[in-house]
Every structure is written in C-alpha cells, then in structure tokens.
Image (cartoon, rainbow, N blue to C red):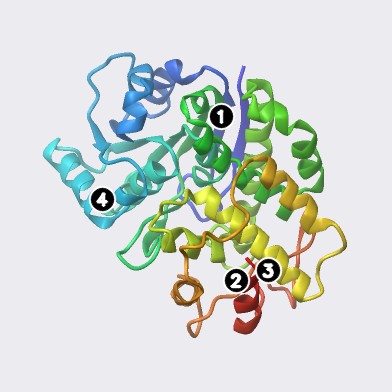
Amino acid sequence: MMLELEIKIPASLQGGYPIRIGTEILGSLWSQIRADFSRHNKFVVTDENVVAAGLLQKLTSGRDVPAFIISPPGETSKNIQTVVSIIEAMEKAYLGRDTLVVALGGGTVGDIAGFAAAIFKRGVPVVHIPTTTVAQADSSVGGKTGVDSSISKNAFGAFWHPAAVYIDVATVGTLDERQFRAGLVESVKHAIIADGQYFDYLERNLDAVLERRTDVLEKVAHWNCKIKGSVVEADPDERNQRRILNYGHTIGHAIEAASGFELLHGEAVAIGIIAAGLIETEMGLSESGRLDRIRRILEKLDVPVKLPRNIAEKDLIDLIRRDKKAVNKWPRFVLIAKIGEVYCQDGQYAVEVAPEVVEDVLDRL
C-alpha cells in the first residue's frame, strides 16, 4: 500500500505531479514508470554509492537501461562539467525531447539530474526516486535544481518541477549513520517553520526514527511532503512564502561551502538553525526555552550545533554576501515567531537583519 499526495503547480505544463510513498516499492517502480511514461525513452542518472548499494539493479531488475553514473558521488561532482557530461551522454545515446530523466539517489543526484533535464533540448521531464533522508524530506519535492560554481553553492540552476516523485523509505536503510542523521535535519526544519504538532511528534518518536522503523519513516516522509508541497503550491517560484524553506540555510550554506563540503548539508544547516535561533533571541523574537528544545533535538541527532574551529568568521561573511538571494550584497533572513510559525514582517517572510547582529551570532557560535 502506498501513501499518495498531489502537488498542484498552476504554472507547470502538467498542472501538478503525484508523490507516492511506500516501503519496499523500488523493485516495482520500473514497471510503474514505464506505464506512466510509456511514450518516453528512459535515461537514469545515479551515482556510485547508489550502484554499490544495489539500488540501480533493484530498480531495473537487471534490465539494460541507459544510465549515467556520477563519479565521485557527492558535492564535489555537483558542478556544470557533470551536467555537460550527462547531456553529452544522452546525445550519444541518440536521445531527444521524448526523453524521461530518472533521478535515482540523494539530493545531489536529484539537483544535478533535474538541472540536466531542465536544459537538455530546452527541457525534458524528470522523475525523482530519492534514496536518502535529505532527499525524501526536501530536495526531491519543489522543482529546485542546480549545481555549484567554484565560488558558491547552487550558483547555476532552474526551477524544473518533476513529473512524479516515488519514495521508498526502505532505501534509507543503505545509508551510514552519519548520512542518515544529517538528512533528518530537514525534517526538523519543516516542523520548526510549519507545524508545531509535527515538532512534538519528532520529539516523542525520534528514537523510532533513528531505529529506522519504516512505519514511522513513512509518516515522516508524508508529513514532510505535505508541508513542503503546500508551500510550493502557494509559491512555486519563490517570490515570497517559499523562502521559509530556507530557514537555517543562509548561514548553513555558507558554513557548508566554507568547510570545503567536509560538513554534510544537514550538519551545516543544523548550525544554521541554531544561528537563526540566536538571531531571533537578539531581535526579541524568541520565547524562553524555545531554542533549548531545538538544540536538544539536534543534539539527539548527533549533528553539530557549533561552528568548527577551522572556519573563519570573515570567510562566512564573504560567502553570506555572495548568497544567491542577496540584494545589495546582503541577504534577508527567515526567522520564526514560534515553533510552527515563521515570522512575517510587512507581508515578507524573509526579513532584514543587520550585519553586525549576524557577526555577533557567528562569534557566539
């Protein structure tokens, strides 16, 4: 049995897309994809980790399917050269505008494959099969695609909404403990910005999540997709409300880049969430005990909540100024009024924070 959601995107050609969530469904998905997209030639984009875990073999049941395997896996391959290689591989396979790109893997695979699909022959559809906690919670839903430049994260990109998303929560069983826990930070973020009841649920059930109980993981995936889906429906191109999904990310992205991507995305965002909480305290937006609750759940995930000593504040400030959402070389920040509700000032979900406040918070981190 699968849980199903529908994301309605008014501006997209298909008007929306389904999200299907289940356990041990990967082996049946290729037949599903062939039925749902019978007129398309399929091309899989994945990476070495996914192949080594046996997930590509499980998806295709050993069929000879055209594929591009990203090597090395991870953020170091998330660049424009990888996208060019994928597009040229599709051209060499004589693929055209009737191609369906199938992104099998984590957030990095999805970002790269989605961007390649967005620009191949002026755009072909993509479906996502996320296999990590971060991708199942966040990056597979919403249509953000992109790759990094040599200077900053996600410098090249496009909004390219998927044709479908298929989530098999059993695939996260292939992750090591560090990857699994770091990816859960996006789930915590969703609860912080949109649903206090979900935050309460995570507090009560985090042990079961960490035990990778599939019934609980299905609920978490469904909750995440429902939250992100509702935000994306309201603001698919990030004009205003969708910015709330960047909570903890403005400083988090800078930390991730400054670490040379030695920190995982979720680990950097965890520090960014604490930074946002400290900014809220500085600006009088935080009630007593709120940041402590957030810190406790992140500590239970065993992700960092302080800046590594080898990251210099001046490097972070420089990266924050280069943020892709910056205006006049300084971004606005997403803050919360309470757990489950983003602070909205004059109708804007990202607000001005003085550089000196951010610098003080970085000192305290």
* In this rendering, the label closer to the viewer, 2 or 3: 2
Disc 1/disc 2 C-alpha distance (Å): 40 Å
Dot 4 falls on a residue whose secondary structure is helix
Sequence-wise, the earlier of marks 1 and 2 is 1
- Circle 3 — which element? loop
Q: Position of residue 178 (x, y in %)?
A: 52, 37
Instruction: Measure the alpha-carbon separation of dots 1 and 3.
Output: 30 Å
Going from N to C along the chain, the mark reached first, 1 or 3, is 1
Q: Nearer the viewer, residue 325 or 4?
A: 325
| SS at mark 2 in the image | helix
Dots 3, 4 in contact, CB < 8 A: no
Tell me the residue that label 3 is attached to. Answer: 349
Q: Amino acid type of disc 3?
A: Tyr
Query: Of callouts 1 and 4, which one flags the residue occurring earlier in the amino acid sequence?
Result: 1
Residue reaching furthest right? 288
Q: What's the distance in space between the residues labelled 4 and 2, CA to CA?
A: 35 Å
Q: Which residue corresponds to the image point at 72% horizontal and 63% vertical from the top-left? A: 277
- N-term-proximal mark, 3 vs 4: 4
Q: CA distance from mark 2 to mark 3?
A: 22 Å
> Which residue is found at the position 74% from the left and 78% from the top?
346
The foreground one among 348 and 54 is 54
Q: Which residue is mark 1?
A: 20
